[in-house]
Image: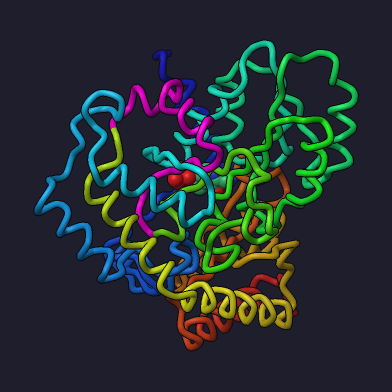
Amino acid sequence: MSKTDWIQQEIENLQSQGLYNRIRTIESPQGAWLVVDGKRVLNFCSNNYLGLANHPDIVAAAKKAADSMGVGPAAVRSIAGTMTLHVELEKRLAAFKGVEAAITFQSGFTANLATIPALVGKEDMIFSDRLNHASIIDGCRLSGGKIIAYEHNDPASLEEQIKANLSQYRRALIVTDGVFSMDGDIAPLPAIYEVAKKYDILLMVDDAHGEGVLGKGGRGIVDHFGLHGKVDVEVGTMSKAFGVVGGVVAGKSVIVEWLRQRGRPFLFSSAMTVPDAAACLAAIDLLEDSTQLVDKLWSNAKYFKAEMKTLGFNTGVSETPITPIMLGEAPLAQQFSRELFEAGVFAMPLGFPTVPQGKARIRVMISAAHSREDLDQGLEAFGKVGRKLGVIQ
Ligand SMILES: *Cc1c(COP(=O)(O)O)cnc(C)c1O
């Protein structure tokens, strides 16, 4: 017995349960079509909502910035890593989101790890939606606060939990995903805000899948619901619709200022790179110039979902361009994905622990980069594979 035998055993268990991640390699730029493991396929699974990941203006901005300012920030933000582009990006993000201030991080994941432990500690309580993203869960755990999960998208359950626990904490935080990435449903933020207001509790929303998607011209969930000034903290990412990489926290300036003092990934992990910051600025330019891409994203999503339903697929409860195709057991989802790939469509299966046991699915991510012909081609492949595997008639 070697001391790593147990790992080999665990990996074999994953393989036999259909839960082993087979990681594909993308050999082309991101876009509606990709070269994956040597094959040209229709891309149905990246978060490139607006097609910005390989947009010429954004690529040009990154190149230009690298030519004049180099690449690496060479330090954490609080020592020598805050460059003019970071400051400009934070100003532009704050204006775009309609908030007092914004602070950037290396990713949405680190934005959550920075924010939650800065706002709550051991004597405090966190009310967290049961289906919140892993980075929120990790941020909650890092804070050392008591974590109380409320039922998914259920403000009544949230209020019950608050009432039952009200007397036992010093301070509290309510945290929810804006758009839930596995199902594509939207948090009932106005009702959650009412609860937060009633009990005077800080409210934080992680809008990773809403940034560039929801609201006017992609300004996010707070804009979507007209809740400006009411949500204390908005976490976002520039790795999805923005097509780059990076995280952002937007909200009250006192909170942003506090994160500059106490956000550990800000203090102990290097800043966003120069080309990334420049590329994010170019993405904001595009979003502020026109709502055309966001509009196209939504019309594509509506078309695809309606046609999938007509074919007889169960697309769950999605209200956004995220389109889950519910299949049940993980091995079926894996086989479905393999058959789609053979038919020229790249859509990855998701199983436990990304989604609950028995709720395996293929998640299609619709993008503004898709043409109507692309969507029709994808629908045809889904129909063919679905009939072959007995998922639809
Ligand atoms: C994708 C995602 C993140 C992580 O964002 P990255 O920028 O990729 O690290 C955080 N929260 C939610 C809800 C997400 O969907």
Horizontal side, residue 308 vs residue 270: left or right: right
Q: Quadrant of residue 290?
A: bottom left
Colour logic? rainbow
**Residue 356 showing in the rendered view:** yes
Question: What residue is shown at x 10% (from left), y 51% (from top)?
Answer: 68
Q: Judge whether residue 313 is colored magenta.
A: no
- Front residue of 182 and 201: 201
Q: Judge whether residue 256 is colored magenta.
A: yes
**Residue 20 showing in the rendered view:** no
Q: Is residue 77 above or below residue 314?
A: above
Q: Is residue 110 above or below residue 308?
A: above
Residue 293 x %, y %: 46, 75
Residue 164 x %, y %: 90, 23
Question: What residue is shown at x 43% (from left), y 51% (from top)?
Answer: 93
Question: What residue is shown at x 21% (from left), y 28% (from top)?
Answer: 80
Quadrant of the image containing the C terminus: bottom right
- Front residue of 319 and 289: 289
Q: Is residue 55 above or below residue 105?
A: below
Question: What residue is shown at x 76% (from left), y 44% (from top)?
Answer: 193
Q: Which residues are magenta?
A: 243-270
Of all residues, the one furthest to the bottom in this rendering is 373
